Structures are given as C-alpha cells and as structure tokens.
C-alpha cells in the first residue's frame, strides 16, 4: 500500500513567515462571475515578502496557503535526484520600504528577514505532477459544481480522512498535487521518511490515505 501524506505548515512561531506576492498569469485574469474562481495560476518565479516576527528561516516556509512551498538548500539536496514530481525555481524577495519601519511599541525593531538577503539559498518547490483522487472510492463530498465554469468544489479533507488516489491518473511521482484539492501538496511515504530522517523544520505531514490499488 502506497500511503500519501499532505505537506502542511507547522505554524511554528519560531520561524520566519513570508507572504506570496506573485507572479500570476494572466495577471489580468477575470474571476468567474458565479463562483469567484480565477483563471490565473501562479507562475515562476515565486515572489515573496518576509513578515515581521522572526528572522529564523525554517527548512520549509509557506508563503501562500499550503500550495506554495519554499525549501532550504538542505531539503533540495535530500530530494533532488531521488524523487520526482517537482522542480526547483528561484525565490525573488521584495520589501515594501514602508514596512521596513515595523517596530514594537518600545521602538525596538521586530526581527524579520532583512534585504538584501544574505542567508542560505532558498528554493521554490514547484510541483509539476498532477493526478486525480478517486472521488467515488474516497467518499468525497462535492459541495457544488459551478454552472458557469464547471469547476467542482469538494469539501476540504479533515485530518483523519482516508482519500484514494486514482492510480490510473498517477504517473509514479513522489510529490504531486491533485485537481480536486489544488491548494494541497501530497507526497508518498518515502518522501515523508526522508523529511523525518533529516529532521527538517517547520513542516508537518498528515496521512491522507493511499494510492488506489
Ligand atoms: Zn465558476
């Protein structure tokens, strides 16, 4: 049985947080009038801004929801060449000059990652592999189907839920996204074990089922 796990934010306050600024294509994409979904999708490079709170960068940083992932050089070295379904892209850092002044009431500056960036290399973990859940076998509940753009919206999985990847749509990759939950990144157990073995920081992995037989 090939178990799958979702890569998730640890919400660990010790680590620096970042916000995704872009880039999107097309940048003038219109939202669906009915469901509000956008036709634009994130393109490379990943552009981020660091948030105040910490200047300690974890092995994983989560600048968007759970779909965009920044990884350290150590993570890159442990995954690259051994696992498939992703590429590494550049991370571009911006900083609004006004937000440079963020400070505490005492006038002491809050820690944050400062630019120009002089820290270790960071990479956009760009997932290239997509597959489908077996909606029926997983018992997934469709919340609605947009009559205008025909997107299907499924109830988000809770932590314990067992979902089954349709094996006909999975091409053997180790890290992948799914059309049903495009904002989630999943991996197979070998990747989970590698992440745990290396004690990479600021990530948690929750089991979400398996690749169907
Ligand atoms: Zn729609």
Image (cartoon, helix red, strand yellow):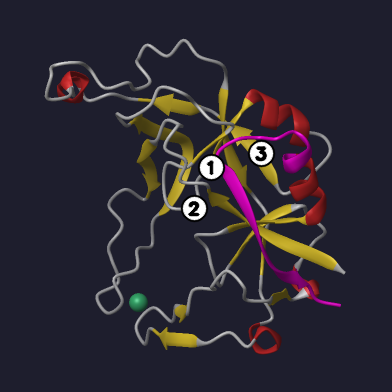
Circles 2 and 1: CB distance less than 8 Å?
yes
Is the C-beta of the residue carrying label 3 under 8 Å from the nearest atom of ligand 1? no
Q: Nearer the viewer, mark 3 or mark 2?
A: 2
Q: Is residue 53 left or right of residue 61?
A: left
Distance of mark 2 from mark 1, alpha carbons?
7 Å
Mark 3 and mark 1 lie on one chain; the one further toward the N terminus is 1
Q: Nearer the viewer, residue 105 or 57?
A: 105
**Residue 175 appears at what percent x and percent y?**
71, 52
- Left or right position of 6 against 26: right
Name above or below for residue 123 compared with residue 211.
Answer: above
Vertical order, 162 against 64 (above or below): below
Q: Which residue is mark 3?
A: 87
Give how far apart the Cα atoms at labels 3 and 1 are. Answer: 12 Å
Q: Which residue is mark 1?
A: 69
Mark 3 vs mark 2, CA separation in Å: 17 Å
Give the labeled residue for mark 2.
Answer: 66
Q: Is residue 173 left or right of residue 38?
A: right
Please tell me whether mark 3 sits on a helix, a strand or a loop. strand
Q: Nearer the viewer, mark 3 or mark 1?
A: 1
Identify which residue is drawn at 66% across, 89% down: 136
- Magenta-tinted stretch: 195-213
Q: Residues within 10 Å of mark 3 (few under 14, many from 20)?
A: some
Residue 4 position within the rendered picture, expressed as x and y whole percent measured from the top left: 73, 63
The stretch drawn in magenta includes residue 192? no
Residue at image coords 54%, 73%: 157
């Amino acid at each position: 049985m090939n178990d799958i796990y979702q890569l998730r934010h640890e919400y660990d306050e010790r680590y620096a947080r970042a916000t995704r600024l872009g880039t999107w294509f097309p940048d003038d994409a219109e939202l669906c009038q009915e469901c509000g979904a956008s036709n634009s999708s994130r393109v490379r490079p990943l552009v981020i801004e660091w948030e105040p709170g910490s200047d300690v960068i974890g092995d994983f940083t989560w600048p968007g929801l759970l779909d965009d992932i920044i990884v350290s050089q150590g993570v890159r070295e442990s995954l690259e060449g051994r696992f498939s379904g992703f590429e590494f892209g550049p991370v571009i850092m911006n900083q609004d000059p006004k937000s440079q002044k963020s400070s505490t009431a005492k006038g002491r500056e809050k820690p944050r990652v400062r630019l120009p960036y002089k820290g270790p290399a960071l990479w956009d973990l760009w997932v290239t592999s997509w597959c489908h859940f077996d909606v029926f076998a997983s018992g997934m509940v469709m919340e609605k189907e947009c009559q205008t753009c025909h997107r299907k919206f499924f109830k988000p999985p809770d932590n314990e839920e067992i979902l089954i990847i349709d094996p006909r749509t999975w091409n053997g990759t180790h890290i992948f996204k799914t059309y049903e939950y495009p904002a989630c990144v999943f991996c197979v157990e070998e990747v989970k074990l590698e992440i745990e073995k290396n004690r990479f920081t600021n990530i948690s992995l929750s089991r979400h089922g398996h690749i169907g037989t």
